[in-house]
Amino acid sequence: MKNILTLEELNKDELFELLAKAISLKKEPHSEEGSLYGKSVALIFKKSSTRTRVSFEAGVYELGGNPIYLHATDLQLGRGETTKDTAHVLSRYVSAIVVRTYAHSDLEEMASVAEVPVINALTDDHHPCQALADMMTILEKKDRLQGIKIAYVGDGNNVCHSLIIASALAGADISIATPIGYEPNKEIVKTAMKLKSDDSKTFITDDPLKAVSDADVIYTDVWASMGQEEEHQKRIKIFKPYQVNKELISKAKDDALIMHCLPAHRGEEITSEIIDSTQSVVWDQAENRLHTQKALLWTLLGERQ
């Protein structure tokens, strides 16, 4: 494993090894202190961030490395330098490049010439680091992933895409409910089908009640992602029947977990009553971004390498 552009880079064993390492680091946060000593990690962000930026900066620091935050406007990318040229130069300075951007093709272009690992911190198509934290959270709370039913309700976006792939690798079932025209990318779904292990199932519908029926986990995300702000009002009307609320979660198992990658638009895709309920694990989910990213950094860059 050199890069993490999507979760396709992992096989089932590698996924569970990463999750086990993340759980270990959560229990003993200082156990790998110094494993990134003398190493710098460039964090290139074209999109704003709270959880991704802070968890990566803190994670690199806690492992003894030096995080270098670089907004795209701070770089010569903003003045016309190519992505490949930037990757060539940064490879001479740092031990890894973490990128949060729009077009997934930009990330692939950087990885094609970079001489150090490139990690996807979010693109319009994928959010693999989020899915790693999601799988860790479910594993912590349910003690297993195989056979767990995850219901994703909302937009078939980057978070949904990575969750589909992660579920396939882990042997979990995933049921996705989106309005017609907002389904996940068909090619990404096909890829997940090729990766799936055991008897995991993927079900896509436009009926949120069917999706959450007997679910162990109910997951949602904002209806308008970054870059879709102009569609916000239109999407509110279309997605209204997909709100995660008391009525919807009553169709799931009584102990179903409520998940959201955050930030949440309370009163839109999820009600405050539900996100603040005892079934909600969104804060653990957010915290686990730190631990899974530390596990990923340690795997790619740690002293054992």
Image: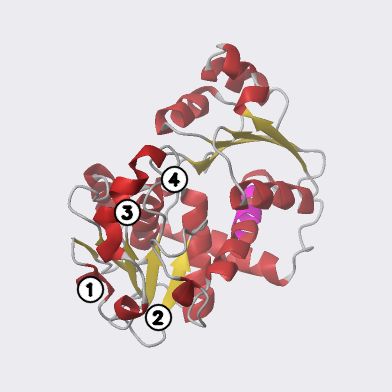
Are the two marked residues, 3 and 1, in contact with CB atoms closer than 8 angstroms? Answer: no
Left or right placement of residue 49 versus residue 215 in this view: right
Q: Position of residue 168 (x, y in %)?
A: 33, 60
* Dot in front, 2 or 3: 3
Are the two marked residues, 2 and 4, in contact with CB atoms closer than 8 angstroms? Answer: no
Q: Quadrant of residue 268?
A: bottom left
Look at mark 4 in the image and give the residue it sits on. 9
**Three-letter amino acid code of the residue under disc 4:** Glu
Give me the residue at 63% from left, 24% from top: 73
Distance from Cα at disc 3 to Cα at disc 1 = 19 Å
Whether residue 119 is visible, yes or no, is: yes
Q: Main secondary structure of the magenta part?
A: helix
Q: Which residues are magenta?
A: 292-298
Task: Classify 40 as above or below 26.
Answer: above
**Mark count:** 4
Q: Position of residue 151 (x, y in %)?
A: 32, 68
Distance from Cα at disc 2 to Cα at disc 1 = 14 Å
Look at mark 3 in the image and give the residue it sits on. 236
Task: Classify 14 as above or below 271.
Answer: above
Are the two marked residues, 4 and 3, in contact with CB atoms closer than 8 angstroms? Answer: no
Mark 4 is surrounded, within 10 Å at the Cα level, by few (under 14), some (14 to 19) or many (20 or more) other residues, namely: few
The tag earlier along the polypeptide, 4 or 3, is: 4
Q: Quadrant of residue 41?
A: top right
Distance from Cα at disc 4 to Cα at disc 3 = 35 Å
Circle number at residue 256:
2
Q: Position of residue 197 (x, y in %)?
A: 31, 63
Mark 2 is surrounded, within 10 Å at the Cα level, by few (under 14), some (14 to 19) or many (20 or more) other residues, namely: many
The tag earlier along the polypeptide, 2 or 4, is: 4
Disc 3 secondary structure class: helix
